[in-house]
Image (cartoon, rainbow, N blue to C red):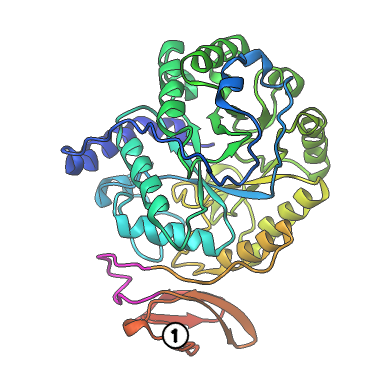
Amino acid sequence: MVSRVLVLSLIGILLIGCIQTDQQNISKPINTDKPPNDKNITGENTTIEEQNNRTSADYSSQPINSTIEKTVIASYYAWYSNKDLTWAVPKPGSPLADHPLMGSYLSNDPKLIDYELSLAHDSGVDAFGWEWYDPGSALDILLNETMNKIDSSTHYPDFKLVLVYSGAAAGGTTDEKAVEALTYLITEYGQRRPTLKVGNRPVIIIYTPQAKSLDQWESIFAKATQEAGPAIYIAQPDDWGIDIPEYLTVFDTISPYADKYHTNAELTGYYSEVSNIAKPNGKPLIVSTYGGGSRMTKLGFDIIRANGSFIIERYELAQELDADWIQLTSWNEWFESNQVEPSVEYGFEQIRYLREANARFKGTELSSLDGAQLRLDSNRVTNTGTQNLYYINCNGSELIAYMLRPGGSTAVPTCTEVSGYLVNDTKIVAGG
């Protein structure tokens, strides 16, 4: 993942300095509630007491008696804080390839969180993979607030969050700190309803696990299990190039961040090797996909975004491989230009193709279009009404707009009026 490690420290400083300053009086108690009838995306057939008797050595060899349902997880980044600083990372003064349709937003705006959760839900996304580093940070505070919002929502009550531990990336922490971090995640969030689980174990993604040896991870997982209980640990390397059988002696399954350099034939080989070990033990096969890119040659590669080509192709591969989950990179990684979130340049094009691909992958009808509420102080969004996702037929091209309409009107807009935006052929651009 080009440039990510180089900017993590700067982003962390910005987040803590810009977001946590505004929330310095927030005190978040440890959550000890464990709802008895937690409705998870996956089945639940084991008790906490039974799981606590297992060690990390059991993770790959001990089968889990659970039902794995088709699930789509989109990588999500809540690190956007100060508009002038955060949005300039990683190269101050260098413009982003794409620009958010709603303008440079702040991740801690509760109305933004509601909008993004609603849009993801209406796109057929089941969960956000929430990047997280350490307890008490701005990202941790926002994670708790987002779980609270899901708990209280009537629109997306079954939306899930996947805990993505990135604190050990590039050797960024000691083994002891890693144990503390995982223990905190499991204790604080492991049994909360919005947390994605398999067999009642919280799902935790370890980003770039190559920073530590497998022996280290085995020891870390064993200690965290002893302190807080077991979890499902997913290895998320930047790409393939790891020893798959060896990793699956410690991790439950593998899902690369973005394996964008490989042919379908190569990917079929990698994923089949994971599938042969993981699926018989009740562990999910996860196929990764990329949201596409704009001017991505600056990062050393180029991916076609137009018409959802890359998304469609990778989803077809996932279906051929009988994948259980899809990991989408990403919902809103604007620095690397792989986001599917609506942009000035592409409007809702990626949302349209994502919604259709998700329905095909899960064998369901297109997801509901119940809408959301968005009230942002932004020069790109001027209305404050109920949003709805509409199909609009313009010049023979079917477009999607996630609408803002005053007064709760449900009338379908015309091609020249999209509640403050103008439709122009295959794009939705900022309009008067």
Q: Is 111 situated left or right of 298 in this image?
A: left
Label 1: element kind? loop
Residue at x 64%, y 58% (from the top left corner): 304
Q: Is 225 situated left or right of 322 in this image?
A: left
Front residue of 230/311: it is 230
In the image, residue 385 lies in the stretch drawn in magenta: yes
Front residue of 294/312: it is 312
From the top left corner, tell me how far across and down residue 375 is, in percent: 29, 67
For residue 185, which quarter of the picture?
top left
Residue at x 30%, y 52% (from the top left corner): 106
Specify the segment rendered in magenta: 373-386
Secondary structure mostly seen in the magenta stretch: loop
In the image, residue 151 lies in the stretch drawn in magenta: no
Q: Is 276 situated left or right of 79 in this image?
A: right
From the top left corner, tell me how far across and down residue 31 is, in percent: 36, 33
For residue 30, which quarter of the picture?
top left
Which residue ends up furthest to the front in the rendered image? 36
Q: Quick check: 62 above or below 388?
A: above
Query: Quarter holding the C terminus?
Result: bottom left
For residue 391, which quarter of the picture?
bottom right
Residue at x 66%, y 13% (from the top left corner): 57
From the top left corner, tell me how far across and down residue 312 is, in percent: 71, 59
From the top left corner, tell me how far across and down residue 316 is, in percent: 77, 55
Report if residue 99 is visible in the image. Answer: no
Q: Quick check: 287 above or below 275?
A: below
Front residue of 365/415: it is 365
Q: What residue type is labelled 1?
A: Thr
Q: Is 298 situated left or right of 396 in this image?
A: left
Question: Residue under circle 1?
Answer: 410
Density class for disc 1 (Cα within 10 Å; few <14, some 14-19, many ≥20) is some
